[in-house]
Amino acid sequence: MKKKIIVGLDFDGVVAYSPLRLLRLPVAVIKRNVLGIRETHFWIPKSSLEKRLWSLAFSTSVFPARGTELLAQLVDDGTVEAHLVTARFSFMQDELDRWLDRQGMRQVFTSITVNKKNEQPHRFKERIIKANRFDYFVEDNLDIVQYLASRTKTNIFWIYNLLDHFIPYPNKFPYLKKALQELAG
């Protein structure tokens, strides 16, 4: 019998389709070339207004991503053990729970880990990946992908977007279904 593949998956942009993924490249260019910020660092909303605006922006993750049906099938047939690892901040937990229940996806995941301490997303994911020893982790944010690929032994799969498709990376895929087909063989 084949060993079960242990996979960690990001939520926004991987499990849930998010049109905001298109903003990653312009934001990264502005951070690096205009603001001079070279290290991976993410803004964390603190005030009530900031949290409301952040929640509104991430409410665009409405639809399941292309490949969630295959994910459920791979879990059901014992090929994959799926773990949801989202860097969504603690104040977004209820919205995530509603989405998972509405889409009937909660049972797909062995574990659901939310960034309850509002850590930097890349550091949070690094900690969870190392603790769980995932075989693969699927992520859509290139900054996080590059950070994790250089700091973990896990195979990091990147779900790129239309604006990022030209950037070289060995394990890049246009959407979740293609990444799952690759890791499941």
Image (cartoon, rainbow, N blue to C red):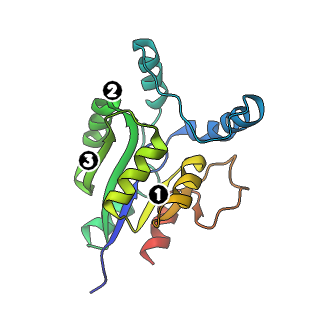
- Among the two numbered marks 3 and 2 on one chain, the one whose residue lies closer to the N terminus: 2
**Cα distance in 3D space between marks 1 and 3:** 20 Å
> What whole-number distance in Å separates the C-alpha atoms at marks 2 and 1?
23 Å
Element carrying mark 1: strand
Q: On the rendered structure, is 66 left or right of 130?
A: right
SS under mark 3: loop
Name the quarter where the N terminus is drawn: bottom left
* Amino acid of disc 3: Gly
Q: Residue at x 45, y 50 (%)?
A: 65
Residue 56 sits above or below residue 71 on the image? above
- Residue 114, by quadrant, is top left
Q: Residues within 10 Å of mark 1 (few under 14, many from 20)?
A: many
Nearer-N-terminus badge (1/3): 3
**Please, what is the three-letter code of the amino acid marked with disc 1?**
Val
Compared across the picture, whether 114 is left or right of 123 comes to left
The residue where tag 3 is placed is: 104
Label 2 neighbourhood size at 10 Å, few (<14), some (14-19), many (20+)? some
Q: Position of residue 19 (x, y in %)?
A: 55, 38
Residue 80 against residue 16 in the figure, above or below: below
Relative to 111, residue 116 above or below: above
Whether residue 105 is visible: no
Amino acid under disc 2: Phe
- Residue that numbered label 2 is attached to: 91
Nearer to us of marks 3 and 2 is 2
Secondary structure, mark 2, is helix
Say few, some or many: other residues with alpha carbon within 10 Å of mark 3 (under 14 / 14 to 19 / 20 or more). few
- Image coordinates of residue 159 in percent, x first then y, are 55, 55
Per the image, the residue denoted by label 1 is 138
Q: Position of residue 36 (x, y in %)?
A: 73, 33
